[in-house]
């Protein structure tokens, strides 16, 4: 599944740089300037922004090009000459408490499509391992089944959203509930 680790621990991207790009252009930018943490075997990218604990973001950007299974990761630069894929996968988890607005803009949320304003609330702050496990399980189920025993045996780190960032009204809306032993969304 993993073709390359970029060596970066934290990806620094000015949001204004990618905000107005479509999926394909964002992927090209992240790939060209190595603004990702992991390049997967199918050309998809994982990028983690962790520098500021009050503004984190984890992104899974599916490769927007046809990617032959036998292509080596070192050859990926030539893939931009290949045919585009319709609707490549995109998932992003954001935690930005300064943007929180009760029942409108969750402090922690998932985006499931690049060009959509939809924010699916998440009642806890997930870490990069939990996000990566979610992506691998959902988008690569066969590989996940074959390799999940290699993952840490303990549950990935998640932290409950502070009450000031998750109101009762947020719990009444459709949201993702992550399992934290003994802790429930209000």
Image (cartoon, rainbow, N blue to C red):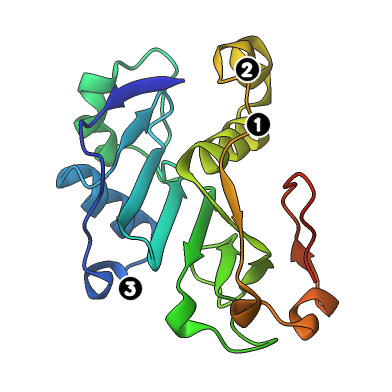
Residue shown at the point (76%, 55%) measured from the top left: 183
Q: Which residue is mark 3?
A: 19
User: Badge 1, how many Cα within 10 Å: few under 14, some, many 20+?
Assistant: some
The quadrant in which residue 130 appears is top right
Residue shown at the point (80%, 74%) measured from the top left: 171
Q: Residue 122, labelled with which disc?
A: none
Q: Relative to 177, is 117 on the left or the right?
A: left
User: Badge 3, how many Cα within 10 Å: few under 14, some, many 20+?
Assistant: few
User: Is residue 61 depicted above or below 40 in this figure?
Assistant: below
Residue shown at the point (22%, 32%) measured from the top left: 6
The quadrant in which residue 106 appears is bottom right
The quadrant in which residue 41 appears is top left
Nearer the observer, 61 or 181: 181
Q: Relative to 73, is 100 on the left or the right?
A: right
Nearer the observer, 134 or 81: 134
Q: Residue furthest right?
A: 172
Q: Which residue is mark 1?
A: 137
Cα distance in 3D space between marks 1 and 2: 9 Å
The picture places residue 97, in percent across and down from the top left corner, at 48, 77
Cα distance in 3D space between marks 2 and 3: 34 Å
Instruction: Tell me which label, 3 or 1, sits earlier in the chain.
Output: 3
Image quadrant occupied by the C terminus: bottom right
Residue shown at the point (56%, 64%) measured from the top left: 111
The picture places residue 159, in percent across and down from the top left corner, at 59, 54
Q: Relative to 108, is 64 on the left or the right?
A: left
Q: Residue 148, labelled with which disc?
A: 2
**Which one is in front in this view, the residue at disc 2 or the one at disc 3?**
2
Mark 3: secondary structure: loop
Mark 1: secondary structure: helix
Q: Are marks 1 and 2 in contact (CB under 8 Å)?
A: yes
């Amino acid at each position: 599944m993993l073709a390359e680790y970029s060596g970066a621990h934290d990806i620094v991207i000015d949001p204004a740089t990618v905000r107005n790009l479509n999926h394909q252009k964002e992927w090209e930018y992240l790939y060209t300037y190595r603004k990702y943490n992991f390049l997967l075997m199918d050309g998809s990218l994982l990028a983690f922004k962790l520098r500021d604990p009050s503004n984190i973001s984890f992104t899974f950007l599916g490769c927007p090009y046809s990617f032959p299974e036998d292509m080596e990761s070192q050859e990926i630069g030539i893939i931009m000459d290949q045919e585009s894929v319709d609707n490549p996968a995109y998932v992003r988890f954001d935690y930005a408490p300064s943007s929180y607005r009760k029942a409108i803009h969750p402090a922690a949320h998932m985006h499931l499509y690049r060009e959509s304003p939809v924010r699916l609330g998440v009642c806890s702050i997930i870490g990069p391992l939990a996000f990566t496990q979610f992506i691998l399980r959902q988008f690569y189920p066969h590989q996940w089944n074959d390799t999940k025993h290699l993952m840490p045996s303990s549950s990935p780190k998640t932290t409950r959203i502070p009450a000031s960032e998750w109101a009762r009204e947020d719990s009444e809306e459709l949201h993702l509930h992550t399992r934290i032993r003994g802790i429930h969304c209000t």
